[in-house]
Image: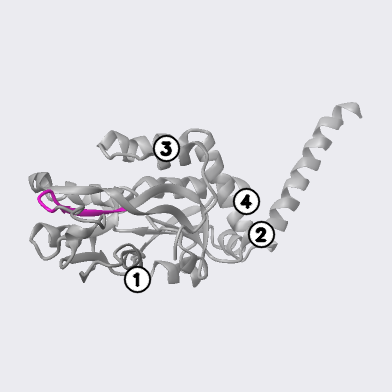
Amino acid sequence: MEFLRPLLLLLLCLVSEARVTTTAISDSATLKRIMESGTVKIGYRSDAKPFSYFENGKVQGYVVDLCKQIVDDLSLELQKPLQTVTVEVNRQNRLSMVASGQIDLECGSTTVTSNRQRDIAFSLNTYVTSTRLLTRKSTQINNGDHRFAGLNGGTIAVTANTPHESQLALFMQGIDYKLLRVNSIAEGVNAVLTGKAQAYVQDDILLQDGLRAIGSAAKEMAISSDYLSVEPYSIGLVRGDTRFLTLVNKSLRKQFSGGYADNRLSYWLRDRGYAVNNLAEQNLRSPATAIAMHD
């Protein structure tokens, strides 16, 4: 009978794992649906390069790769093959798509804010950037007592459905400016290029990509050294599903500690000439819990 002991121990382990998996599913509406359908729906952005975008017939980017790895890890946790289903989202509907369950993971360049945390939950930070101003090099921003006094009387462009408008109101107190709402990064960059706006407010890593799109004209432009705020990016999930969030963060911790996230960051950003700031490098070493830096 002694020779049966290893087999019995193996069977006990398998039964134990099955019970853990069953408990995890029963505690999570998201995991239950994933288990039943065999799919994980990830929301991607078409225009958030290099994090999440559609090009040459493929959904791709740094955060997209992290999300695909999360799906692989969920497959191991649930002991079931899972298929990744990609669903396009935009700035207007990305939060509602998560909250309504139309997507399981929002994989883009979404900043954690206190207002957004009322609607959805967020994973560990995937990247950390900062909000800066894009101007022509000929524009003198620091022209007076206020660090943005050079924009007094000018027009400043912001992307609609982002926190940048409220940030402007906070940092531009005492500055008289007109607000120009744009619908895309390309439109914001073009507004400065054509003189419709004296500045465009956006996350610095996204501004870098916006400048790439205008070719040699980028030489005439400058990204401010001063920043308005720190912007932590995270993956969006439905609120209240603690079990699902725990497994997502477990996968991310493994990706960051094991070097996968660093490898993907090099592939999508460093190797392509994007400047990765110190906050993002620090987050690679120790990914932070999603904490809102502003509304």
Marks 3 and 4: CB-CB under 8 Å? no
Q: Residues within 10 Å of mark 3 (few under 14, many from 20)?
A: some
* Disc nearest the viewer among 1 and 4: 1
Label placed on residue 92 = 1
Label placed on residue 72 = none
Q: Nearer the viewer, residue 114 or 287?
A: 114
Q: Which residue is mark 3?
A: 281
- Lower sequence index among marks 3 and 4: 4
Above or below, comparing residue 219 to residue 181 in the picture: above
- Callout 3: helix, strand or loop? helix
Q: Nearer the viewer, residue 294 or 287?
A: 294
Marks 1 and 4: CB-CB under 8 Å? no
What stretch of residues is rendered in magenta?
131-139
Where residue 111 appears, x then y in whole percent?
A: 41, 58
Q: Amino acid at mark 1?
A: Gln
* Disc nearest the viewer among 3 and 1: 3
Q: Is residue 1 visible?
A: yes
- Lower sequence index among marks 4 and 2: 2
Marks 3 and 1: CB-CB under 8 Å? no
Marks 3 and 4 sit apart, C-alpha to C-alpha, by 32 Å
Marks 1 and 4 sit apart, C-alpha to C-alpha, by 33 Å
Tell whether 31 sits left or right of 17: left
Marks 4 and 2: CB-CB under 8 Å? yes
- Callout 2: helix, strand or loop? helix
Identify which residue is drawn at 41% across, 34% down.
Answer: 263
Q: Main secondary structure of the magenta part?
A: strand
Tell whether 38 sits left or right of 135: right
Identify which residue is drawn at 28% across, 51% down.
Answer: 206
Label placed on residue 78 = 4
Label placed on residue 25 = 2
